[in-house]
Amino acid sequence: MKTLACYLTLIPCLLMAVDSPGQREDWTHLKQAALKVDQAVAQFYRQKRLPVPAVADDATFLRRAFLVSVGRIPTIEEARAFLEIDEPQKREELVHYLLRSRGYSSHMTNWAFDLLRIADARNGTTATNEPYRHWVRTAIHDNMPWDQMVQQLLASQGDGWNPKTAAVGYYTRDRGMPLDNLANTMRIFLGSRMECAQCHDDPFGKTERHDFYQLAAFTHGQGTVNQNHMSPLWDELREDRRAMGQEYNIAQILWDKIYGLSLSGGGAGRIALPSDYQYRDGRPGEIVGAKTPFGKGVRMSDKKDRDDGREEFAKWVTTKNPEQFPSVIANRMWKRVMGKGFYEPIDEFIPAKNTQSPELMMHLVKTMIDLKYNLRDFQHVLMLTKTFQFATNPNPSTVETGDDFHGRKIERLSAEQIWDSLITLAGGDPDRKPMRSLDDRIYLNGRPVLVGKKTMTQLSEEVLALDSEKEVRAYFTKFAAEVKKGGGGGGGDSMMAMTPVQRYDRDAQVRASELPSPAPRSHFLYLFGQSERDVVEGASRDPNVGQVLSLMNGFVQRQLVNNSDAHLYKGLKGAKSDEEKIRRIYIAILNRPPTSEEMGWMKEEIKVAGNDGLRNIVSALVMSSEFLFLQ
């Protein structure tokens, strides 16, 4: 009979992740919050006269916990260790380990990238989202409280390459589309769908066009830091870009990748109604002051511009909507853990009193506030509940709302979960590989220049400090000469080695969060529905023929099924019988032992096909619905 100590020795990484008994983090407050969730669910069951569901078995819990918290299935070693241990607290220990592992931040990064529509590049420009991407990744990795993260995103201004102000990417990502950005902001953080009000009063809601423009006044007046000083030079170079050749390409580094990533103006606090404004409450071109449409009211004068509108807006979103702001993010986390939003759609806020269980919804809001918007701890609370451990209901819900809290809802894995699980089978624990780091090298024509001499962060600081056209021209002449002297677009391996940058290409077998974002159209992630990051949460989990062909002929066959060096096959070493090999393959892929009937089928396959039988079993299990779905 194995003990927890034995379990830890089987997985050395756990020994480092889980606190020693004398230093163990106090989970008491998290357990108490989890108990209150279960009590509210129990009360709901009594009111609806529903039978209490059975608790899922260890194998189901293991797979569920891994995929929900770290976005991949366990390695064969992790799965065997958990299933073979006899320890009453092992589920709690597993949740604690997973939520404090690097895999958690990787999985949450995918969520944040989808929500905030973060891509590496920007269409129609050579600008990059690299520093903004890194800022978000770091905020997730450091477990920055959600209210602080939102506050920094919405109130940001300054240098896009400065680590302290790189959150400006939230606005510069939508350069030239401030109204669309505002509509997305309201949808993401407050669950308020206001996009229709950009053009007309919302016929399905309460938002009028006048309300929307008053709200837009808070963030109006976005510009770039000192870009006007370079405008004359840029216009000259653009007029005859072919003749200017390299000078134009060098200037483009400054124009697109430095000025283009900067954000000036803190928010004017007033805005002019559009020329096509059609309602009696305002005239086309009329100046209106900033005013909030709900929550604790905030307004600004329409008499003169200010420079703190975005800060006022950020404070209003995070602190003056005492139920709406925490409710929306609590509901998003509930859906991540439980499989379905407490209310749906998750980006359309519903007051707690109007939900199927007001008591539970109010408790979730209070818990989010009590935990100071710590999203990791909030998910920890949910994963400690009995509700999370309930077996999935195979039958349709009989409750009017459609949610009877009967186990996690069955859903297809996301593209990222499938990919991360496959590379786990192929290469073992993917979180042991280095994370992608910030690449702030200066690129010209796709190649790094001045490596070891100057970075984009340094260059941006110097350029944005220039406060006249004369200074910009002088700086550009000197910078262009430095680039040409340094190779103009060169930079061999020896030069690149001077700057420690961890970067992965499309073919790397690393976590989805480390790969180019979004993945190229021919990549596995794209075929399986990864978001193109154009719209909020734009991923798809719908099946298609391309996915079937990819599983049958692509990465799965090359790197897993037919690869004798795959980590999955290494896990078979020491197995002395076909029966034990089959058992280990099932545990590695489906995270459970085979049934007696399945064992009979698979032994027959090996008897008929010999060594090829093992590969056939692997191929069949990876393409099974059980592998592609989470329950």
Image: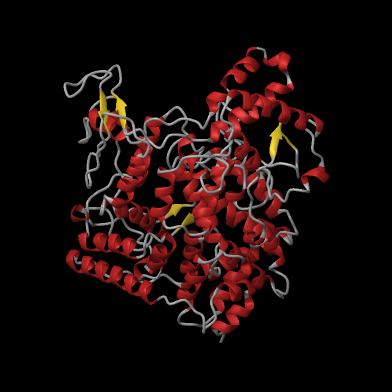
Locate residue 278, reporting x and y percent.
22, 19
Residue 3, picture quadrant: bottom right
Q: How many marks?
A: 0
Q: Could you tell whether 503 is left or right of 362 in the image?
A: right
Q: Could you tell whether 219 is left or right of 59 in the image?
A: left
Identify the image quadrant of the C terminus. bottom left
Q: Could you tell whether 159 is left or right of 608 in the image?
A: left
Relative to 33, residue 487 above or below: above
Relative to 628, residue 28 above or below: below
Q: Could you tell whether 322 is left or right of 56 in the image?
A: left
Which sits in the foreground, 323 or 555?
A: 323
Identify the image quadrant of the N terminus. bottom right
Q: Residue furthest bottom?
A: 1
Locate residue 281, reporting x and y percent.
17, 24
Which sits in the foreground, 554 or 349?
A: 349
Q: Is residue 190 visible?
A: yes
Which sits in the foreground, 35 or 300?
A: 300
Residue plotted at (60% across, 74% down): 16
Which sits in the foreground, 88 or 453?
A: 453
Locate residue 250, reporting x and y percent.
69, 27
Way the structure is coloured: secondary structure
Relative to 539, residue 27 above or below: below
Locate residue 408, reporting x and y percent.
38, 60
Residue plotted at (50% across, 31% down): 224
Residue 568, picture quadrant: bottom right
Q: Is residue 250 visible?
A: no
